[in-house]
Image (tube, helix red, strand yellow):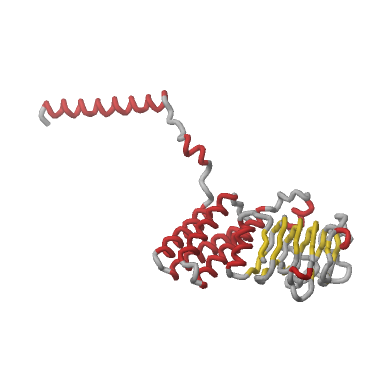
Amino acid sequence: MPAYARVVVIVLAALLAGTFLWQSAQRILHPPQKNPVAAAAGPAAPSWQSESLSELDAGVRDAGDGNIIPAEVDVDRAASVIAASRAQSEPAGAEFFASAIGKLDRVGAAHPDNARLIEHVTLVRIELAQLRTVQLVGTDPAGSATAAAAAEAEHEPPAGPGVHARHSVEIPGHVVIASPHQIAAGQTLDPKTLGGNYLDATLMPDTSEMILPPYTRAFADNVRVENLTMEGASQTLDGIHWKDVTFIGTRLRYEGGELDLQNARFVRCTFGFTTDERGARIATAIALGQPSITIQ
């Protein structure tokens, strides 16, 4: 190697070594600062939330481009992710529900007359509503008894002689029923008329109705249920005025009729709602944590 080449190599090596040493000293003396914007944003969202919102974004794009079937597939995938997270009791903040509902609104608004697309969108709303009811476990202001009952909702006791409904002995105010409770037109079911503030239907089959109003299920019957906690079995919401009621582990149905929920709460409930605009309204209200909704 010529002498000048060796000099060049030595100089370049010295420069690289000096640069490395200078950068190392800078990192020690001036450590990198956290990005205040990123820090304010908080921790990244769980992967299942990002995945479900990403699928809904894809649904917005496909629906906007007129690709109906791909849009349906997109929202169905989002529903599957949400259902899986609900089964694992994954937590989610209010911002997640608001974002997901907003995206569903955009998918539906792209083709409001397409009944099949609206049905798929509404089913995702129902999944979100069911997920929202999982979030309330352990936060019930009524006390730990309600939360404990909700946490055990999947472990129904066997029916038979000598079997007691869950918590019916330990907690005062429980009224245990083994068959539907009939209510006539013009009647109000509350702690005074029931004889307690907790209607325990956990010994009843999941498909049995807790409360049976007149068959018309219309507001004209003036049937009211107030200031009660109700657990287990099933319940159709149509045609009854519900006020200050908490449902725990109940299969709730809405068949598209008149609906009046005032300060109603749902803990670990499942929903069988119509997939039309009315069903979408009640599912959206529950998903967004809105305790009151009236549909006439």
**Residue under the image location 29 percent in, 27 percent down:** 19
| Quarter the N terminus occupies | top left
Total marks shown come to 0
* Residue at the image position 78 percent from the left and 50 percent from the top: 142
Residue found at the very far left of the displayed protein? 2
Could you tell me residue 44's position as x and y percent? 51, 46
Rendering coords of residue 172 (x, y %): 88, 55
| x then y, percent, for residue 75 | 50, 64
Residue 257 relative to residue 5: left or right? right
Viewer-closest of 71 and 9 = 71
State whether residue 234 appears in this view: no
Horizontal relation, residue 210 to residue 89: left or right = right
Query: Vertically, is 89 above or below 22?
Result: below
- Residue at 40 percent of width and 28 percent of height: 27
Q: Is residue 122 shown above or below 99?
A: below
User: Which residue is more in the foreground, 155 or 265?
Assistant: 265
Camera sees residue 129: yes
Q: Is residue 101 above or below residue 183?
A: above
Query: In what quadrant of the picture does the C terminus appear?
Result: bottom right
Location of residue 9 by image quarter: top left
Residue farthest to the bottom? Answer: 215
> Which residue is pictured at 71% across the width and 50% down the height?
138
Q: In the drawing, does residue 51 fall left or right of residue 228?
A: left
Q: Quadrant of residue 216?
A: bottom right
- Residue 101 in picture, x, y percent from top left: 55, 57
